[in-house]
Image: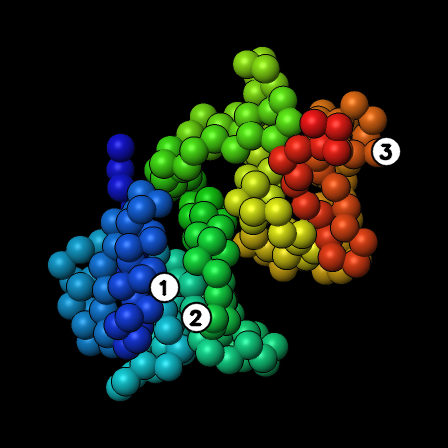
Amino acid sequence: MLQLKILIVDDDEHLSYLLKYYLCDQGFSVDIAGDGQQMLKKMERNPFDLIILDWMLPGEDGLSICRRLSEDENSPPVIMVTGSGGEADRILGLDCGADDYLSKPFNPRELLARIHAVLRRNPRLVAAIPEANHAPFYFGPYRLDFSQRCLYRDDCKIDLTNSEFGLLKVLAQQGGVPLTRERLGHLVDGRDHKPSSRSIDIQISRLRRLLEVDPTHPCYLQTVRGLGYVLVKKSADE
């Protein structure tokens, strides 16, 4: 199977290698560049499917690099990372052509979820997204199989839409941490969801009808007041 290639462009060598080892464990092929010149040399030798680009670089900064890459329709998508988490900087990063934006410090699992969300927008790459290395996630009588993108209850397959699977997958990967509907929406499809949007709520309701004995009193797909939704491995009765 095609192995997706990621280029990390960051002058923080320690962070770059930590991310490289983590993403390699997730099934990606990863290379590192310390600045824009090294990035161009790497890209001349090898095609990449995605670039993780730091804003603050020696020489040409990440914003300038991102603008230049966005002018070429054949350039890979870019996830911009920066130590600044201000809304204005985030908007500026997206305006310069970045496909997503992540503030340091960040959890590598969130970066992975955003990588998957960005790659899923490209039909050519969807089938190659490495999910086979993830062990199945078990909750109650259910098994979420990442390699087959399927949900099973006692070995009986439950059909899910892509968005339903994506939502369960993100919740499963968060290790019991509640996520707001806005954060869930962004991690599932890479787009910003307004607080007033109810698309995630609708999907949650559909999943509860599939998973719960009593959807009005969910055991697994729970709401944490003021924090968001969480996927619980075991109900109180188990």
Q: Secondary structure at mark 1?
A: strand
Q: Is disc 2 placed on a helix, strand or loop?
A: strand
Quarter assignment of residue 235: top right
Q: CA distance from mark 2 to mark 1?
A: 7 Å
Query: Residue 31 sits in which quadrant?
Result: bottom left
In the picture, the disc for residue 52 is 1
Residue 221 percent location from the top left of the image: 71, 38
Quadrant position of the C terminus in the picture: top right
Q: Residue at left 45%, top 26%?
A: 148
Picture residue at 77% right of the left edge, 46% below the top: 223
Residue 159 bears which disc, if any?
Answer: none
Q: Nearer the viewer, residue 97 or 90?
A: 90
Quick one: quadrant of the N terminus?
Answer: top left
Q: How many marks?
A: 3
Residue 170 % position (x, y): 56, 45
In this rendering, the label closer to the viewer, 2 or 3: 3
Q: Earlier in the sequence, mark 2 or mark 1?
A: 1
